[in-house]
Amino acid sequence: MGRRYFGTDGIRGRTNESPMTAEIAMKVGQAAGAHFVRGEHRHRVVIGKDTRLSGYMMESALVAGFTSVGMDCVLLGPMPTPAVAMLTRSMRADLGVMISASHNMFADNGIKLFGPDGYKLSDDDETAIEARLEKPVKLAASADIGRAHRVESARGRYVHAVKSSFPEHLRLDGLRVVIDCAHGAAYEVAPLALWELGAELISIGVNPNGVNINDQCGSTDTRALQDKVRETRADIGIALDGDADRLIIVDNEGRVVDGDQLMALVAAGAHRRGELRGGGIVATVMSNLGLERFLAGQGLSLHRTKVGDRYVVEAMRAEGFNIGGEQSGHIVMTDHATTGDGLVAALQVLAQLVEHGRPASELLHQFDPLPQLLKNVRFAGGEPLKDEKVIAAIADAEEKLTGTGRLVIRKSGTEPLIRVMAEGEDSRLVEAMVDQICDAVRKAA
């Protein structure tokens, strides 16, 4: 059957509209719980959430679903997505759930599922759960209904794990750091971890009220962070998104540093230490060609996947890589985490800043990116990418960019958008090709 509910990163949508309703969330709990029943032991699921208003409703609905099929629920409260992944594995749970729409605004929400190994579910598992959503689920006997309880030690356990990823011989003493937690899931744990490691800390985006998550803050809107870095003359700024699985950096001059530059820095450091596995890193088709050339200059490869950090992780596991990620800021280091972890990635960047003793504006500029342009075209329905004029526009652009650049056209997995990206050595040609394709898509949409 087709995938009605799951996109590139779990289930996501506008709250109280299908598929993000309490009714469907309860059914997801029942279907996922039934799918992960593995023997006679008492089954448990770990559930975390970010700070958006609908988190309470979705949490209650999921608990109702899981307990109805006999699963116990361990409730973490507001916690980063990577914390849920880590605790699912360390607490020997059968399943982990993160209630979050990541970098989206508060009106949206989502459900991300993790297997007992702490990794996001495969396409096969998600398809199997979708199939169960269409069928009646066997409910537990009255005496076997699951229980739910909250765990107060979860934050401390995650902070300890994150700090353990930082080199033991280093400290952040004397480093002035601004962190923007996007009024999201890391609003308590991220500042605490950085402060305990010695940073002189300035925190913004740490006052969630249910509706301000990702609102003019965080990794998708760094203006407040840039202003604060300049105002306080900080050494570096750290921006997380609503569920803290992605990272964007602002250097000491207030300039934004994306995931490609961060992967280049982290990979180069690991390569020097003899800790890089796989002979390179994994990134998506969206990563800049400049990153690929930078790695090639060091004898390293760039293995590309389709967009989505889950596909990056799948390739890393299959091919033996230990560093990968996305230009958008998902940085995955499987030596420390099973999924993208913005805080762990930030600590690796800070470690290099301390070790090298150079300003962030120098250290974080690892390569000159090629001119790259991404534009989104919203569409109401249909298949605009199958339109003959759109196909012709894409073919023309590919021909003109041959040998000097790349073109990536894809449908968003979370929104009704066509994403058009081009990069190349000639910025004017790149812009012309993107505009040409976008115009064709708009006419076809």
Image (tube, rainbow, N blue to C red):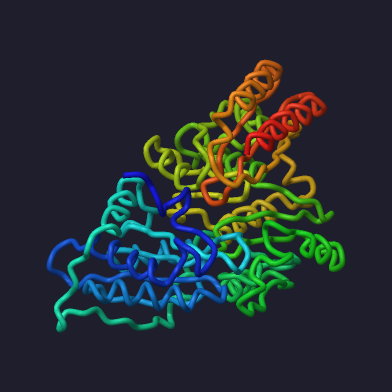
Which quadrant of the rendered structure holds the C terminus? top right
- Name the residue at 43% across, 54% down: 338
Q: Is residue 236 above or below residue 287?
A: below
Whether residue 443 sits left or right of residue 415 in the image: it is right
- Closer-to-camera residue (355/407): 407
- Name the residue at 53% across, 57% down: 341
Whether residue 132 sits left or right of residue 305 in the image: it is left
Quadrant position of residue 224: bottom right
- Closer-to-camera residue (290/403): 403
Quadrant position of residue 114: bottom left
| Residue 172 location (% of width, % of height) | 67, 65
Q: Is residue 364 above or below residue 437?
A: below
| Residue 215 location (% of width, % of height) | 70, 67
Q: Is residue 258 above or below residue 53?
A: above
Quadrant position of residue 35: bottom left
- Name the residue at 40% across, 51% down: 4
| Residue 316 location (% of width, % of height) | 43, 40
Count the labels in the image: 0
- Closer-to-camera residue (315/267): 315
- Closer-to-camera residue (178/358): 178
Which quadrant of the rendered structure holds the N terminus? top left
Whether residue 29 sits left or right of residue 245 in the image: it is left
- Name the residue at 32% across, 77% down: 64
Whether residue 76 sits left or right of residue 435 in the image: it is left
Q: Is residue 175 above or below residue 148?
A: above
| Residue 295 location (% of width, % of height) | 61, 31
